[in-house]
Amino acid sequence: MKLAVSLICSVLTVVSAATAQVELVSGNYFPAEFEFQELQKIKSEETIDDPARLSRIDGGRLFSDVGFRKYEKRIYSAGVSGSVSIEIVSLLDFRAAYSLLTLLREGSIKDGPPGDACTTMPGGIRFAQGKEWVRIQGNGVPEDLPRRIGLSVSNRIGSRHPKPPSLVAHLPKTGYDPSTLRYYPGIEAFKSYSGSVPEHLRHDLNFEIAQAHYSANSQTGTLSLLSFPTGEVAEEYFDGLGSTEPGSKSGRIYAKRAGPLVGMLDGTFDPGTAEKILNGIQFSYSIRWIETPAKPATVWGIPAGILGTVVKSLLFVVILCCVSILLGIGFAALRIALRVYAPQHSPDRPERTEITRLKMR
């Protein structure tokens, strides 16, 4: 009896441990205990879900402006005097995570893993995956540790693989420096990052912005590509540019509209070079017909499709009967005609009739 009770307790213990581990992995993106030998213990941890408390966090104002949901941070002790900081920010969508990646980085953006897109810097790594933006920074730890931790966090978040915002793909390629790309999902994020909004970027409207540095023919400047909800709003904005200041501190501003996109090139470019760069802004509409299947009609409570099949079957039977009757009448008329007009060829002539008599007693 004692042996049976011990076995049951052991099974329950194993099941409980397995359940706890599943819950830990599914609800927590931080590394599991003892997953990395270099991480000794958690020195501090913090969770924030109120945007008002983000002001003391590095980049916290941007978290709120792009679409904040939740902030989590852990600091681990590593080695004798080292430490590792892991920050995971849950956001509204991938556009918000990608925006933070372009704004809070120190190097070029490249495809993951870890994450859908990532950037590295000395002693640290940052990446965006799905709705999460992750920042890992090591101090006094092996050089490859932040990347290995990043891969673990990325695997726990799970596969996402969304594409970068479509606005980024519309940036012209001529003179483009991808290491300077900055993407803003709204004007508030632009204002928080830049500190102010230039006169030619009117901020009474909300729109996506993609910015990058351009250089061509020993001339440099910045291209701001704006995306509006509709072409009509973009046209209204573009027409209103004539009432703003035509120049800037660094030189002239050139503008072009393509559908709902408006590009503004600010710098030392001459008209020919500016036109060559802005001509790379292209936009075309595509139409896709999406047919919604209609509900099947009913007649007398019977689906029209089934009723149509029954009617067609009955009609086929009627036609077949009519054809059979006509063929029977035709054969009968032919037989009568042979008997009257060609009795020698008639199958009913007397000599062809055989009679067999059976005498039964």
Image: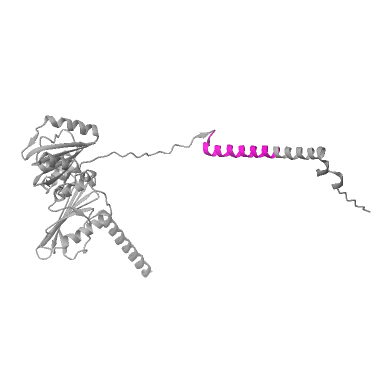
Image color mode: one colour
Residue at coordinates 13% horizontally, 44% vertically from top-left?
61
Asked if residue 319 is among those painted magenta in the image, a careful observer would answer yes
Residue at coordinates 17% horizontally, 41% vertically from top-left?
278
Residues 76 and 120: in front is: 120
Residues 289 and 305: in front is: 289
Q: Quadrant of the C terminus?
A: bottom right
Visible residue check, residue 85 = no
Q: Position of residue 108 (x, y in %)?
A: 15, 53
Q: Position of residue 105 (x, y in %)?
A: 14, 51
Q: Position of residue 3 (x, y in %)?
A: 36, 70
Visible residue check, residue 149 = yes
Which image quadrant is residue 270 in?
top left
Name the side, left or right, on which 307 lies relative to 146.
Answer: right
Which span of residues is magenta-colored?
300-325
Residue at coordinates 8% horizontally, 47% vertically from top-left?
218
**Given the current orientation, which residue lies at the most extreme right position?**
361
Which image quadrant is residue 290 in?
top left
Q: Position of residue 159 (x, y in %)?
A: 28, 54
* Main SS, magenta residues: helix
Asked if residue 128 is among those painted magenta in the image, a careful observer would answer no
Labels in figure, total: 0
Taking 10 as reference, is 274 above or below it? above
Residues 343 and 15: in front is: 343
Q: Quadrant of the N terminus?
A: bottom left
**Given the current orientation, which residue lies at the most extreme bottom position?**
3
Residue at coordinates 15% horizontally, 30% vertically from top-left?
240
